[in-house]
Image (cartoon, helix red, strand yellow):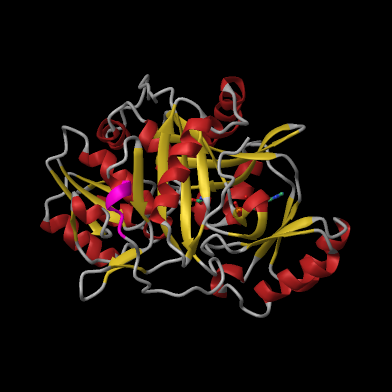
């Protein structure tokens, strides 16, 4: 098969590597890709959100399937455009991707289908927001309605803080259009975990679970990031709880989308919180997570090409996805300063030693090559290093040995990924 992967971060590195390892893959092209991916696949410098560019590339290479990695092209309708061209694409349509692209869509949808979630109020003016914040005594979460690259969520304790966050979104344009309307949510408490499923519009099949580490520093201190590391399976989710999430959240979501004429195909990522009243939806994402993919896919026994084919061919009924029993963790190495301002184009150390390690994989998240062909940083999260092991202790030893081997003094990483 000719496969095009859209995207160029650590997630797409892991996706591309799994596809590359399938005997069914004849040609693999990644756009834009990155220097790590270019070691085994051809990369084309077309941005992930360049919808015309990606469509032209898919036509040019006669792609049998396009795997769309990030949310932005999905929300912008890349799947719809490819379908019009007669090209099969893995991922939801723009309408279905609203589950991630619009927080109010997703909250209202869950309301209509009795899917458990925190109480919320949709606000497009500061007066309404203030009233709601006061009624919750400031113990709330303020969220920009649209996509804000994971930054549009402020978890608050105090009335003033929540009003300030709302004002920045609604009146000071902090997130542009994405913050023109906001949600004020009841703040719920519990352990967080993520469940990944694949759907063909009708059936939802569990792929696996993971736990992200969103804060920048050890012991969940510091600002929220895109994710500083992950572990799979999620330690908080046993088989029974995972089944509960599938039964009460994932399956009703796929059924609800179908009943509303927006069949949901592709990966559904349910971010949940395990509250005293059971699992509740924190957010939905319409794609794999980054860095969660870097711990799920190394554990996958089933051929990823089969999963993708079954989804686009609407043939997931009774399909079973298998993972190895080994655990996995991934540790993100970020540029100092991330998620605030950080330097780019820093020359990175050699990865030769790490690349030779057994059951350890280094994924490139934010790297590129300069004119001298040196590997340089071009993003906040630069690498993620994944290790498989019989237990979490072994995973941590392997992953952190590798991280220390890299010894990059302009980067930082959390030392407590997967620590129980
Ligand atoms: P999100 O970008 O929606 O995943 O939110 C980022 C983080 O904010 C989540 O991982 C949670 O830790 C926290 N969060 C979001 N919504 C709520 C909520 N209603 N109650 C408590 N914490 C929340
Ligand atoms: N790691 C969080 C996300 O991919 O949304």
Is residue 85 visible to us here?
no
Query: In the image, what residue occupies the spot 31% across and 50% down?
Result: 13
Q: Where is residue 171 in the image (x, y as percent from the top left)?
A: 68, 79
Residue 351 is one of the magenta-drawn residues: yes
Q: Is residue 28 above or below residue 197?
A: below
Q: Quadrant of the C terminus?
A: top right
Query: In the image, what residue occupies the spot 45% across and 75% down?
Result: 343
Q: Which of 50 and 83 is in front in this view?
A: 50
Q: In this view, does 18 lie above or below 67?
A: above
Q: Position of residue 207 (x, y in %)?
A: 43, 31
Q: Quadrant of the N terminus?
A: top left
Q: What stretch is highlighted in magenta?
A: 350-354
Quadrant in which residue 156 is drawn: bottom right
Q: Nearer the viewer, residue 169 or 255?
A: 169
Residue 161 is one of the magenta-drawn residues: no
* Direction from residue 269 to residue 297 in the image, left or right: left
Q: Where is residue 372 in the image (x, y as percent from the top left)?
A: 20, 74
Is residue 14 visible to us here?
yes
* Direction from residue 301 to residue 57 in the image, left or right: left
Query: In the image, what residue occupies the spot 11% across and 58% down?
Result: 60
Query: In the image, what residue occupies the spot 68% across and 75% down?
Result: 168
């Amino acid at each position: 098969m000719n496969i095009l992967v859209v995207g160029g971060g650590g997630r797409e590195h892991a996706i591309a590597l799994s596809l590359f390892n399938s005997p069914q893959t004849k040609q693999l092209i990644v756009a834009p890709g990155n220097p790590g991916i270019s070691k085994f696949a051809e990369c084309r410098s077309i941005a992930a959100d360049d919808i015309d560019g990606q469509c032209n590339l898919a036509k040019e290479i006669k792609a049998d399937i396009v795997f769309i990695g990030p949310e932005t092209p999905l929300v912008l309708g890349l799947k719809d455009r490819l379908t019009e061209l007669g090209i099969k694409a893995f991922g939801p349509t723009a309408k279905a991707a609203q589950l991630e692209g619009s927080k109010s869509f997703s909250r209202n949808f869950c309301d209509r289908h009795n899917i458990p979630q925190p109480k919320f109020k949709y606000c497009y003016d500061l007066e309404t927001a203030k009233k709601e914040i006061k009624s919750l005594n400031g113990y709330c979460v303020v969220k920009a309605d649209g996509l804000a690259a994971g930054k549009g969520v402020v978890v608050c304790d105090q009335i003033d803080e929540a009003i300030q966050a709302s004002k920045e979104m609604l009146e000071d344009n902090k997130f542009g259009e994405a913050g023109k309307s906001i949600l004020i949510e009841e703040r719920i408490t519990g352990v967080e975990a993520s469940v990944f499923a694949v759907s063909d519009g009708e059936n939802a099949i569990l792929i696996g679970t993971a736990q992200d580490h969103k804060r920048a520093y050890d012991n969940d201190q510091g600002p929220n990031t895109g994710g500083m590391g992950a572990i799979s399976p999620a330690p908080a989710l046993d088989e029974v709880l995972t089944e509960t999430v599938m039964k009460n959240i994932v399956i009703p979501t796929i059924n609800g989308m179908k009943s509303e004429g927006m069949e949901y195909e592709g990966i559904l990522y349910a971010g949940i919180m395990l509250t005293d009243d059971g699992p509740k939806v924190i957010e939905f994402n319409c794609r794999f997570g980054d860095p969660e993919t870097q711990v799920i896919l190394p554990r996958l026994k089933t051929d990823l090409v089969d999963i993708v084919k079954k989804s686009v061919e609407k043939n997931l009924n009774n399909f079973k996805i298998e993972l190895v029993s080994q655990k996995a963790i991934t540790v993100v190495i970020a540029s100092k300063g991330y998620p605030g301002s950080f330097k780019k184009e820093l020359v990175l150390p050699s990865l030769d030693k790490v690349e030779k390690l057994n059951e350890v994989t280094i994924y490139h998240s934010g790297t590129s090559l300069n004119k001298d062909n040196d590997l340089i940083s071009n993003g906040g999260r630069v690498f993620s290093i994944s290790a498989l092991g019989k237990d979490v202790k072994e995973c941590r030893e392997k992953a952190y040995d590798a991280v220390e081997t890299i010894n990059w003094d302009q980067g930082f990483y959390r030392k407590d990924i997967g620590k129980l």
